[in-house]
Image (spheres, grey):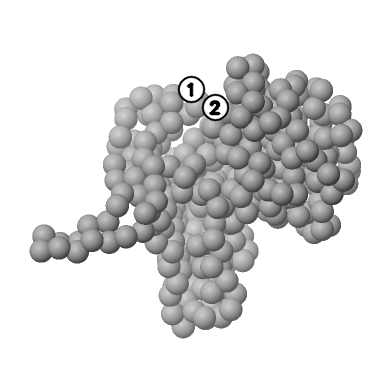
Amino acid sequence: MAGPENINLAILGAGRIGRVHARAISGNDRAVLAAVSDPIQAAADDVALHFGATARTVDDIIADPAIDAVVICTPTDLHADQIEQCARAGKAIFCEKPIDLDADRVRDCLKVVADCDASLMVGFNRRFDPHFMALKAAILDGRIGKPEMAIITSRDPGAPPADYIKRSGGIFRDMMIHDFDMAVFLMGELPESVMATGSVLTDPEIATLGDFDSATAILRWADGRQVSISNSRRAVYGYDQRIEVHGSDGMVAAQNEHPINIEVATSTGYERPPLHDFFMTRYVAAYANEIDAFIASMTQSVSSVPTGEDGLNALLIADAALDSARAGKSITIAS
């Protein structure tokens, strides 16, 4: 039961990512998952039952003054409207990326958030992964000098369903947007331009949906620093997540994580267990840290980071990358 110091949270959207956040909230001793909503009642009921919450409508949750904060895990085309509704109701808001697929709509939404003096945090969970946080700390501590180049590899085990791809905004806005945010996080500022390319190598149906399943982008900063990003929707060996940052005085890297980190050496060679299956297990600690940071922004009056502006910046890079892939040339990133 919630005590006077606890934060009452509600989740909008009881799908895959909603369950991930429900688990993170339930493991946090400063918060209670009070309510969950989903248009599929069975999904809402299942999450509510599993995590001790109440299944309610979105309108009921937003109107309830006992709900301190809302975690938005609904489809992207609902995000901006729900952010605005929650901001006007005085709720603290956590929203999965992206806020919207249209940059102007995001700007309008952020204006409402600012006018309401509301708190908004955008869900770029990889900033909170312990391994990537340690990598960032090494950069901030000056251990590799000034970061000059980086390589970010993100490859999914398989493509999402066609219905999801239709609404996702495509690989740059849905998948690589995490890596764009990570590039800004590591380099400390927004890049100046992007050169990107995309192909369909795994499933011809993805081409009929107007998307790519394999993509590469090179971000360039005004001072010449570069970040290369590789994405694929097919990695038959597991969920591939690696980062390497090269600096003036050295290099720091975060390698793939395994559910069991052992290595067996025999006369036939070296063997290691497989990689994680997907983000739900690879980023368990990141999601817990992310929700903890969101709660801390309310209990300790600290800023919510990543901010709505961080979400807008990642979308602007994604838009420029898509334009670049279509045009076959480098594109300057809008401000």
Identify which amino acid the numbered label 1 is placed on. Answer: Asp
* Spot occupied by residue 250 in the image (x, y as percentages of width and height): 44, 80
**Residue 204 coordinates in the image, percent (x, y):** 32, 27
In the image, 329: left or right of 96?
Answer: left
Name the kind of residue labelled 2 in the image: Arg
Q: CA distance from mark 2 to mark 1?
A: 7 Å
Looking at the image, can residue 276 be seen? yes
Q: Is residue 197 visible?
A: no
**Label disc, if present, on residue 183 of the rendered structure:** none
Mark carried by residue 167: 2
Query: Decide: marks 2, 1 in contact (CB < 8 A)?
Result: yes
Q: Quadrant of residue 58?
A: top right
Secondary structure found at label 2: helix
Left or right position of 316 against 243: right
In the shown orientation, is residue 109 left or right of residue 176?
Answer: right
Q: Is disc 1 surrounded by few (<14), some (14 to 19) or many (20+) residues within 10 Å? A: few
Horizontal side of residue 252 vs 295, given as left or right: left
Q: Which residue is mark 1?
A: 163
Asked which quadrant contains residue 82, the reply is top right
